[in-house]
Image (cartoon, rainbow, N blue to C red):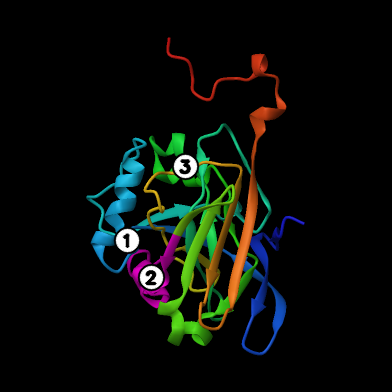
């Protein structure tokens, strides 16, 4: 199943809640989603990723204070195993995911992004592809004491792509506080936040067909992991009959 469904006119996502005592399924209504940019504790830590995307002609609105808030439609939230795209210029990136419901939950995701469109609009580019989260979350209050030792990793086509500690980012409670201060109209229940990303290991945007990502505690061995395949919809159409991605200049 495509694990995200519409229920009672609200978007909902089916997840596994993994606590210190058990694992159980739960359905969460999602009313709003925000993606953060440059959500690091030290501003200098975000510079390398800003330079990384700038190499591809992507420019960040530095006149807006970090972390920057990108409102994203909830319908692109997915826990699926495939992401459908148009063309080869899209890529993922590992991010902390927060889910505010009856309590605050943490997980991990990848806000797959159309990099060609991102040169025109960062918001539109993130809206153009599924934002994938792993189908497992942890209650944050159960892991908060050890949070700064956790590790985020991603890989593309089997090649390590990102490897960064959660201590590089704002803590979940600080992300949530900032979002609520800057967007006071957001719901206090049914809010998903993708917490921003970090530069890749080779400091270049990666492209590929298979993306994998994880959040792990190296001490306890506890982890959440997920992956998805990228499907270019144009591959179904014979080359001579593919419409151009960009309108021709006349």
Crowd around label 3: few <14 · some 14–19 · many ≥20 (10 Å)? some
Q: In the figure, is residue 244 to the left or right of 24?
A: left
Compared with residue 201, is residue 190 higher up or lower down, i.e. above or below? below
Q: Which residue is mark 1?
A: 67
Mark 3 and mark 2 residues within 8 Å of each other at the beta carbon:
no
* Residue at 55%, 20% in the rendered image: 244
Question: Element under label 3?
Answer: helix
Magenta segment, which residues?
163-185
Compared with residue 188, is residue 141 higher up or lower down, i.e. above or below? below
Main secondary structure type of the part rendered in magenta: helix
* Residue at 29%, 61% in the rendered image: 45
Q: Which sits in the foreground, 34 or 167? A: 167
Quarter of the picture containing the C terminus is top left
Q: CA distance from mark 3 to mark 1?
A: 18 Å
Q: In the rendering, at what x and y percent does residue 207 appear? A: 51, 41
Of callouts 1 and 2, the N-terminal one: 1
Q: In the rendering, at what x and y percent does residue 81 appear? A: 68, 53
Residue at far right of view: 1
Mark 1 and mark 2 residues within 8 Å of each other at the beta carbon:
yes
Q: Which residue is mark 2?
A: 175
Q: CA distance from mark 3 to mark 2?
A: 22 Å
Q: In the figure, is residue 99 to the left or right of 61?
A: right
Q: Which residue is mark 3?
A: 125
Q: Which sits in the foreground, 165 or 36? A: 165
């Amino acid at each position: 199943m495509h694990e995200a469904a519409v229920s009672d006119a609200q978007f909902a996502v089916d997840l596994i809640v993994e606590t210190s005592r058990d694992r159980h399924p739960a359905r969460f209504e999602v009313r709003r989603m925000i993606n953060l940019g440059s959500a690091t504790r030290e501003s200098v830590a975000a510079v390398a990723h800003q330079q990384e995307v700038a190499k591809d002609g992507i420019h960040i609105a530095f006149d807006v204070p970090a972390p920057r808030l990108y409102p994203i439609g909830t319908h692109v939230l997915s826990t699926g195993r495939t992401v459908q795209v148009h063309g080869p210029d899209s890529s993922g990136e590992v991010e902390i995911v927060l889910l505010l419901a009856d309590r605050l939950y943490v997980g991990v995701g990848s806000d797959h992004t159309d990099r060609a469109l991102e040169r025109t609009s960062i918001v539109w580019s993130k809206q153009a592809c599924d934002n994938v989260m792993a189908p497992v979350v942890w209650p944050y209050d159960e892991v908060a004491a050890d949070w700064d030792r956790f590790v985020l990793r991603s890989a593309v086509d089997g090649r390590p792509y990102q490897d960064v500690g959660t201590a590089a980012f704002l803590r979940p409670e600080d992300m949530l506080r900032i979002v609520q201060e800057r967007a006071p109209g957001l719901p206090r229940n049914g809010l998903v936040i993708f917490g921003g990303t970090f530069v890749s290991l080779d400091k270049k945007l990666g492209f590929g067909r298979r993306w994998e990502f994880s959040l792990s505690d190296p001490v306890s061995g506890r982890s959440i992991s997920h992956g998805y395949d990228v499907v270019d919809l144009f591959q179904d159409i014979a080359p001579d009959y593919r419409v151009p991605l960009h309108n021709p200049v006349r």
